[in-house]
């Protein structure tokens, strides 16, 4: 239509001129008509030029909008100004959408990066579209794994089978052991994605190594506790059945069996008490309130409470001199439990005529308390595990002396929750030195 407007305008202008020349200046009635024709042609020509200029500006504005720039609708005049304003509004809306998409992309990237679980996203052709940092760490993926087939980067049949199932439209769980050569256990699930975008399947990976370890520990603990409880219960039952079957009439046998009942009942009570203490310590039920505890006076008090047991076995129990200024930052009840268990072990395993000494020293902001004995010592292969629950270097001898196998485990947990640690230094036949290191007050 615009192609016809220019010739039409020129024709009108020419017609007006021809009529004016033909009729002459004397024909007054035709002058208005000529003027109207000439004016209409000139107006159409000017309007056409303006429209073309405005059209070029709109084209330039569209190019600027495509490049992400703003446009100024006030620069346009005439009937195309509303169109320019509309283009500017579209540009503003596009920039807003781009900002929203950029923010969502940054949020998604931050979430994926901060996740401890691994995430893999696959295209429909099996190529890896996305893998977060956790997935790279758990599976030891190469840096250039994205946009490559997953089977080129991994040799894990369970994961690859689950990925193929997800691409086929089926969710599939799986479990991996030692996928990156680090002895880890990983469970995961591959699931199809319902969207029509590039992503066709997602795989979620979770490191359950610590959970599996705790499950094994719990299973071992239940088995060990059941075994330890079964022994005194079986003995008590045997003594009771023997007495009920007629041994009560034999005073000497009855006295021996009643003594055995009392001994096994005491052992059972000690085992239950230790189980409860260990449960409170591990679960956080025992609240430790740290305070400055003068170590010298504390050791004197603990030794005085154990002196009678030491004399009953002809053991020499001594407290080494401790500087009165030495103090430990610890809960008094917790420290009494730790030192009490270490001293109880020394009293049980040190043979008659031996000696036990307890002392303390301070250096570099820490206090070290020691319980030394002249017992049989501990072989090096047992020392690394001596603080485990129910672990005994000599199980038969430990039961003979009434040990529950939990005292050192309790001592370790209390020391660690107090910000310290425990350990042992020992040689077979040369006695042992159990120590606990605790922070000193500032």
Image: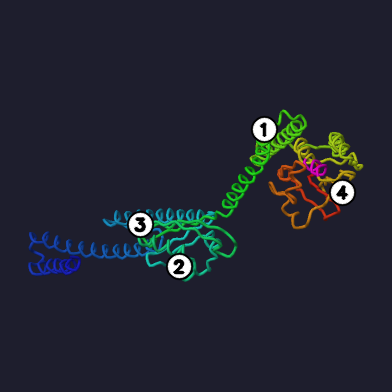
Q: Is residue 186 left or right of residue 170?
A: right
Q: Secondary structure at mark 2?
A: helix
* Label 1 vs label 4, nearer the camera: 1
C-alpha gap between disc 2 and disc 4:
63 Å
Tag 1's secondary structure? helix
Q: How many numbered marks appear?
A: 4
Task: Specify the segment rendered in magenta.
Answer: 341-348
Q: In x, y percent, where is residue 168?
A: 35, 62
Res. 154 in view = no
Which residue is labeled 3 in the image? 195
The local crowd at label 4, few if under 14, some if 14 to 19, many if 20 or more residues have their Cα within 10 Å, is many
Q: Is residue 48 magenta?
A: no
Question: Where, by quadrant of the figure, is residue 148 drawn?
Answer: bottom left
Q: Label 1 belongs to which residue?
A: 240
Location of residue 334 in the rendering, given as x and y in whole percent from the top left corner? 75, 38
Q: Secondary structure at mark 4?
A: loop
| Up-down relation of residue 374 to residue 30 (above or below) | above
Q: Earlier in the sequence, mark 2 or mark 1?
A: 2
Describe residue 394's horizontal placement relative to residue 324 as left or right.
left
Which one is in front in this view, the residue at disc 3 or the one at disc 2? Answer: 2
User: Alpha-carbon distance for marks 1 and 3?
Assistant: 73 Å
Residue 5 lies left or right of residue 437; in this view the side is left
Q: Spatial distance from mark 1 to mark 4, Cα to Cα?
A: 38 Å
Residue at x 49% of width, y 62% of height: 131
């Amino acid at each position: 239509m615009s192609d016809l407007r220019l010739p039409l305008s020129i024709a009108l202008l020419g017609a007006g001129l021809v009529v004016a020349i033909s009729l002459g200046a004397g024909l007054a009635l035709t002058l208005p008509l000529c003027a109207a024709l000439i004016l209409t042609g000139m107006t159409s020509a000017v309007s056409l030029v303006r429209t073309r200029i405005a059209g070029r500006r709109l084209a330039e504005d569209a190019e600027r909008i495509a490049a992400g720039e703003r446009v100024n609708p006030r620069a346009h005049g005439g009937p195309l100004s509303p169109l320019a304003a509309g283009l500017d509004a579209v540009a503003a809306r596009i920039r807003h959408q781009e900002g929203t998409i950029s923010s969502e992309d940054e949020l998604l990237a931050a979430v994926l990066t901060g996740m401890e679980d691994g995430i893999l996203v696959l295209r429909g052709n099996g190529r890896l579209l996305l893998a977060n940092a956790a997935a790279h760490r758990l599976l030891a993926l190469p840096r250039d794994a994205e946009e490559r087939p997953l089977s080129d980067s991994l040799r894990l049949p369970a994961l690859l089978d689950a990925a193929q199932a997800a691409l086929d439209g089926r969710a599939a769980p799986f479990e991996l052991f030692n996928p990156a050569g680090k002895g880890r256990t990983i469970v995961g699930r591959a699931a199809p994605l319902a969207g029509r975008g590039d992503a066709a399947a997602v795989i979620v990976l979770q490191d359950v190594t610590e959970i599996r370890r705790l499950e094994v520990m719990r299973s071992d603990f239940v088995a060990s506790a059941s075994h330890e409880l079964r022994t005194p219960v079986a003995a008590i039952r045997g003594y009771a059945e023997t007495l009920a079957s007629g041994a009560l009439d034999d005073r000497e046998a009855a006295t021996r069996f009643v003594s055995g009942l009392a001994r096994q009942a005491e052992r059972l009570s000690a085992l239950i008490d230790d189980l409860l203490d260990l449960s409170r310590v591990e679960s956080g039920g025992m609240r430790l309130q740290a305070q400055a505890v003068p170590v010298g006076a504390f050791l004197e008090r603990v030794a005085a409470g154990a002196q009678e047991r030491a004399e009953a076995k002809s053991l020499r129990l001594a407290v080494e001199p401790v500087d009165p200024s030495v103090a430990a930052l610890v809960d008094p009840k917790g420290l009494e439990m730790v030192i009490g268990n270490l001293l109880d072990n020394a009293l049980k395993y040190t043979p008659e005529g031996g000696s036990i000494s307890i002392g303390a020293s301070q250096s570099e902001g820490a206090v070290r308390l020691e319980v030394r004995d002249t017992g049989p010592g501990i072989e090096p292969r047992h020392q690394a595990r001596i603080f485990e629950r129910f672990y005994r270097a000599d199980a038969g001898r430990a039961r003979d002396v009434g040990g529950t196998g939990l005292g050192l485990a309790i001592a370790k947990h209390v020391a660690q929750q107090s910000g310290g640690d425990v350990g042992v230094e020992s040689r077979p036949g040369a006695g042992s030195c159990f120590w606990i290191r605790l922070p000193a007050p500032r």
